[in-house]
Image (tube, helix red, strand yellow):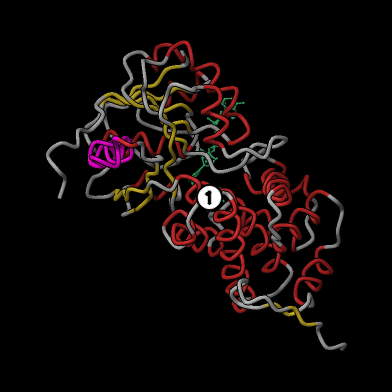
Amino acid sequence: MTAPDTLPYTRIAVIGSGTWGTALASVLARAGRDVVVWGRRVEVVDAIGQGTHPALEGIALPHGIKATASLETALDGAEAVLMVTPSQTLRDMAAQMRPHLGKAVPVALCAKGIERGTGLLLSEVVQQELPDHPVGAISGPTFARETALGYPTAATVAFPFTFDDRLNPNASPAARMAVTLGGPEFRPYVSDDLVGVEVGGAVKNVIAIACGMMSGAGFAENTRAALITRGMDEMKTLAEALGGRRETVTGLAGAGDLTLTCSSETSRNMKLGKQLGAGIARGECFDGLPVVVEGETNAVSVCDLAARVGVSMPICETVNAILHHGADLKQGFRDLWSAPIEGEPRTLEIMLAQPAS
Ligand SMILES: NC(=O)C1=CN([C@@H]2O[C@H](COP(=O)(O)OP(=O)(O)OC[C@H]3O[C@@H](n4cnc5c(N)ncnc54)[C@H](OP(=O)(O)O)[C@@H]3O)[C@@H](O)[C@H]2O)C=CC1
Ligand SMILES: O=C(CO)COP(=O)(O)O
C-alpha cells in the first residue's frame, strides 16, 4: 500500500526519444503524469506528438505525451527527469541539461553502461555534471516494445538514501519516482543500492553478447544456463568490489534483466552475439543498420573498471577480446571452459589445473 506521504512527481521530462524513452513516457502517461519527451530528430518528435514512434510499429501511444526538440522546453517546470539516451552520451546530455534544470530536481538514469575512458558508473558521471541533484537509476527486465504495449513489467528504482531518506524512506526520491511510474501494468520496486543496480544493467549486456555468441556458434541451453549463472557471479563480485550489495544482483536489475536479455533475440546484445557467433561480419550485422548495442562499447568499460578494482570477469574479458582485440570466438570459449577449476562461490579459494585432454 502506498504510504500517504509519498507524493508522485506530476511533471516529468524524458530525455531521449528512442524506443525506451518512448516506452517510459507511455508508462508515465498511463499513470496520469504530465510527460514531455525530448528528442533531437524533429520527425521522431512529430511522430510521438501524433501518438506513434517509427521504431515501435503498430503501437498507438497513450494520449497526452508531449514531445519537443527543445531541451529548454522539455525541462521547463519538470519535477523529475528520466535520461534515456545511450550510455556514452550521458555526460554531454547532463551538461546540456544543467542550465535548464530546476533546483534539486531528481534525475533517474535509464541507460545501461559504464563510461568509456573513465570507468565511472553512469550515476558518477551525471553526478559530476549535476552535483546539486539526486541521481538514481531505473533498471530491470524491460523490453521497450512490451512495456509500450502495456504488458506487465517490473523494474527497480534506485537512489542512494540520504540521512533524511533513512528517517523517512517513503519521501525519498526512489519512493517518489516509483509511485510516479507505478500502475497496473508497470510495477516498480525501490532500492537504495544504486551501485548494485547499475552494475547489473551494465554487465548483463556483455553477458548477453556471450550467450548470443555461443548460440550462434551452435551450442544450446546448457551453455546458456552456465553463462547466465557464472555471469551473475561476475556481476556480484564487481558490485561488491564497488560497494554495492550481492543481493541486489539477484533482483530485477541483475538476475531479472540477465535472464531476459540472454534468452531472447529481441535483445540487440544477444542478437549481435548470435550473428557474430554464426560468422557474420560486424559490418553486416543488423543488415548493416546502426543499432544501439550497449554491451559492445561496455565490454571495454566493464573490463577496464574490473581491472582497476582487481576483479576477474572471465566471460566479460572473453567477449571484450573477441569484439575488440581480434580474438578467435571459438577458441575464446574453449579457453573459458578449460580454465583452472575454481570454487563456487569464489570465497572458496581453490584453483585446480584441468586434467590434460
Ligand atoms: N530498448 C529497450 O528495450 C531498453 C533500452 N534500455 C537502455 O536505454 C538506452 C537507450 O536505448 P534505446 O531507447 O533502446 O535506443 P534507441 O536506439 O531506440 O534510441 C536511442 C535514442 O538516443 C538518441 N541519441 C543517440 N545518440 C545521441 C546523442 N549523441 N545525443 C543525444 N541523443 C542521442 C537517439 O536519437 P536519434 O533517433 O536521433 O538517433 C534515440 O532517440 C540504452 O542505454 C539501452 O540500454 C534500457 C531498457 C530497455
Ligand atoms: O535492456 C534491455 C531489456 O531490459 C534491452 O536489451 P537490449 O539492449 O539488448 O535490446
Which residue is located at x 31 percent, y 15 percent? 77
Whether 95 is among the magenta residues is no
Q: How many numbered badges does the structure rendering display?
A: 1
On the question of residue 286 being in view, the answer is no
Give the magenta part as a residue range. 164-181
Q: Residue at x 45, y 22 (%)?
A: 38
Residue furthest to the left = 4
Mark 1 crowdedness (10 Å alpha carbons): few <14, some 14-19, many ≥20: few
Q: Is residue 263 left or right of residue 168?
A: right
Indicate whether 76 appears above or below 8.
above
Of the pair 194 and 20, the residue shown nearer to us: 194
Q: Which residue is mark 1?
A: 243
Q: Quadrant of residue 74?
A: top left
Q: Position of residue 327 (x, y in %)?
A: 86, 58
Q: Amino acid at mark 1?
A: Gly
Say left or right for 282 vs 209.
right
Q: Position of residue 57 (x, y in %)?
A: 45, 41
Q: How far from the left and from the top, in percent, is residue 212?
A: 65, 62
Q: Name the residue rendered at 32%, 35% in the picture.
A: 173
Q: Is residue 336 above or below residue 139?
A: below
Q: Is residue 353 above or below residue 197?
A: below
Residue 114 percent coordinates (x, y)? 62, 41
